[in-house]
Amino acid sequence: MIIWLFSSGPKGEGDAADLLQGWQFPEKQQPIADRIQFRDIALFHGDLDMEKLNFIERSMIKNVKAPAGDFRDWEIITSWPEGNAAVLLEELPAVEAV
């Protein structure tokens, strides 16, 4: 079985990994990741819509000065699974026509 993982969340302009200071995976979930032996993990920018948050959540976001807005790059998001599919097709054994 071949597994790819993705994470979404960093807000703001710039490289997603830089915004999260290199973080990619929750430490407590690392044993699970090690067991499933995923091939790769992608990190995508996220979306923070203040209108969808309750009062406490909005207060917390304002306190940490997190940037609000939609920072997702749909071209990158859609090309990632397409690239993974291409890798799978390359790795499939050739099937003879019947």
Image (cartoon, rainbow, N blue to C red):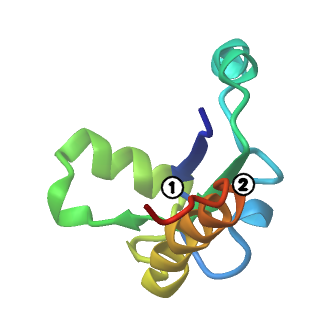
Disc 1 designates what residue?
A: 9
Number of numbered discs on residues: 2
Could you tell me which quadrant the N terminus lies in? top right
User: Residue 16, located in which quarter of the rendered image?
Assistant: bottom right
Left or right of residue 84, residue 39 in this image? right
Element marked by disc 1: loop
| Circle nearer the N terminus (1, 2) | 1
Q: Amino acid at mark 2?
A: Leu
48 vs 6, nearest the viewer: 6
Residues under numbered marks 1 and 2 in contact, where contact means CB atoms less than 8 Å apart: yes
Residue at label 2?
20
User: Going by the picture, which residue comes out furthest to the front?
Assistant: 98
Q: Residue at x 68, y 49 (%)?
A: 41
Cα–Cα gap, marks 1 and 2: 9 Å
Few, some or many residues within 10 Å of mark 2 (<14, 14–19, 20+): few
Viewed as shown, does residue 21 lie left or right of 96? right
Check disc 1 and give the amino acid type: Gly
Q: Left or right: where does residue 51 sit relative to residue 9?
A: left
**x, y percentage for residue 91?**
71, 57
- In the displayed structure, 66 sits above or below 13; it is above
Tell me, yes or no, if residue 64 can be seen here: yes
The residue that appears at 16% across and 64% down in the rendered structure is: 51
Left or right of 20: which side holds 60?
Answer: left
**Residue depicted at x 73% and y 74%:** 15
Q: Nearer the viewer, residue 84 or 77?
A: 84
Q: Position of residue 36 (x, y in %)?
A: 65, 22
Question: Which quadrant holds the C terminus?
Answer: bottom left
Q: Is residue 72 visible?
A: no
Q: Position of residue 5 (x, y in %)?
A: 58, 44
Residue 29, disc = none
- Measured along the vertical axis of the image, is residue 19 above or below residue 34? below
